[in-house]
Amino acid sequence: MKLTVNGEAQHVTATTLAALLDELDYAPDFLATARNGELVPAAERGSCTLEDGDRIEVLSPMQGG
C-alpha cells in the first residue's frame, strides 16, 4: 500500500495505524498521530484502518531550550 507519511511517500504492508507505527519503528508512547488531517487518539490506532493514498502525520514532542 502507498501512503504519505510526514510528507514522504512510503510503501508499507501495514493495514492499521498501530501496525504502521510498528512497521516504521516508531515508539508509540509519546506520539501524536493524524490520518488525512484528523487526529487519531492512541486508543484508536489499532482500529484505525489505512487505505491506499492516506496521508499520515506522526509527531513527537521535542525538548526545547
Image (cartoon, grey):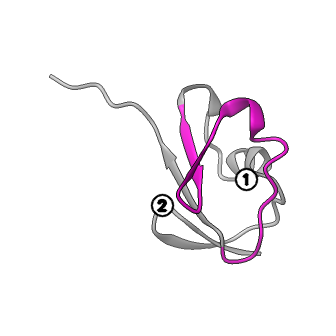
Residue at (73% x, 52% y) in the render:
23
Classify mark 1: residues with Cα within 10 Å, few (<14), some (14-19) or many (20+): many
Compared with 41, 57 (above or below) is below
Which numbered disc flags the more N-terminal residue, 1 or 2? 2
Residue 27 locus on image (x, y percent): 62, 33
Residue 63 position (above or below residue 22): above
Q: Amino acid at mark 2?
A: Asn
Report whether 48 appears left or right of 59: right
Q: Quadrant of the N terminus?
A: bottom right
Whether residue 10 sits left or right of residue 60 in the image: it is right
Q: For mark 1, what is the residue?
A: 20
**Residue lying at 82% horizontally and 56% vertically, measured from the top left:** 49
Q: Report, in whole angstroms, how far the alpha carbon at label 1 lies from the one at label 2.
A: 13 Å
- Asked if residue 34 lies in the magenta stretch, the reply is yes
Residue closest to the far front: 38
Which residue sits at x=73%, y=53%? 20
| Position of residue 4 in the picture relative to residue 1 (left or right) | left
Residue 52 counted in the magenta span: yes
| Proximity of marks 1 and 2: CB atoms separated by less than 8 Å | no
Looking at the picture, how far across and down is residue 45, in whole percent?
75, 41
What mark, if any, has residue 6 been given in the picture? 2
Q: Which mark is residue 64?
A: none
Where residue 44 sits in the image (x, y, percent)?
76, 37
Q: Position of residue 47 (x, y in %)?
A: 85, 44
Task: Report the quarter where the C terminus lies.
Answer: top left
Write down the region rendered in magenta.
31-53
Give whichever of 25, 3 is nearer the camera. 3
